[in-house]
Image (cartoon, grey):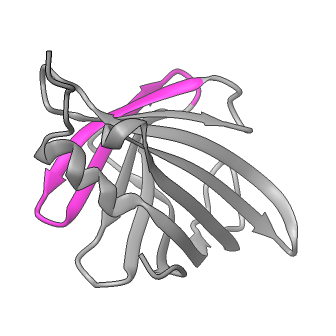
Amino acid sequence: MPTPQPDEHHLRLHRLAGHWVGKETMHPSEWQPNGGVADGVTTSRVALGGFTVVTDYTQSLDGQTTYEGHGVYTVDSTTKDVVLYWFDSFSGSCEEFRGGWDGDVLTLFSESPMMGHMRMTSDFGKPGVLRASMACSRDRETWQGMFDCDYARQDAS
């Protein structure tokens, strides 16, 4: 039996791989009433024969880590949805995001009792830049921005 190979859907995820650094604009929210600016660092790598991208994220304010996350991106073999399994220091559990690509933009959605609906967007339209944003909603119609950032790629990949 031939060894399975990643398809074009998996290969598209490889755009996430790299070391990304940026200043995040934190919008006022119930979690951060005054908003502010945080430092965000994401390090992602292609893993498991090219079928996944594993990512680690750290956010800090004034040199102190305020939030950490770990994720695994893959592709649902049946629906071809991009799936992100996310673990973080805020919830302590696994959250599943699902969505897909529209051109250079990857948009993923999740729903949880604690956070409501979440929308995460990653835009790769500008070389060497990952424009990311996160928004939340109670009804999936009215969205409140949580943060946005233009992360700069810091590696040669």
Nearer to us in this view, 153 or 100 = 153
Residue visible at 23% across and 43% down in the picture: 10
Q: Is residue 104 depicted above or below 81 in this figure?
A: below
Q: Is residue 16 above or below residue 80?
A: below
- Image coordinates for residue 152, horizontal then vertical, percent: 49, 82
Looking at the image, how many numbered discs can be counted on the residues? 0
Residue 46 drawn in magenta: no
Residue 136: % across, % down? 44, 45
Q: Quadrant of the N terminus?
A: top left
The magenta region covers 94-114
Instruction: Single out the residue that lies furthest toward the front.
Output: 1
Residue 139 visible in the snapshot: no
Q: Residue at x 74, y 38 (%)?
A: 89
Q: Can residue 38 be seen here? A: yes
Left or right: 37, with 134 as reference point: right
Name the foreground residue: 56 vs 46.
Answer: 46
The reply, left or right, for residue 155 in relation to residue 49 is right
Residue 126 place in picture, x, y as percent:
27, 84
Res. 29 image quadrant: bottom right
**Residue 21 falls in which quadrant of the image?**
bottom right
Residue displayed at 47% across by 37% down: 72
Query: Relative to 149, is 101 above or below?
Result: above
In screen coordinates, is 141 left or right of 91? left
Quadrant position of the C terminus in the picture = bottom left
Q: What secondary structure is the magenta-colored segment mainly?
A: strand
| Relative height, residue 68 to residue 95 (above, below) | below
The one of 47 and 19 positioned closer to us in this rendering? 47
Extreme top residue here? Answer: 1
- Residue at 51%, 56% (x, y): give it: 44
User: Residue 155: x, y in percent?
Assistant: 52, 79
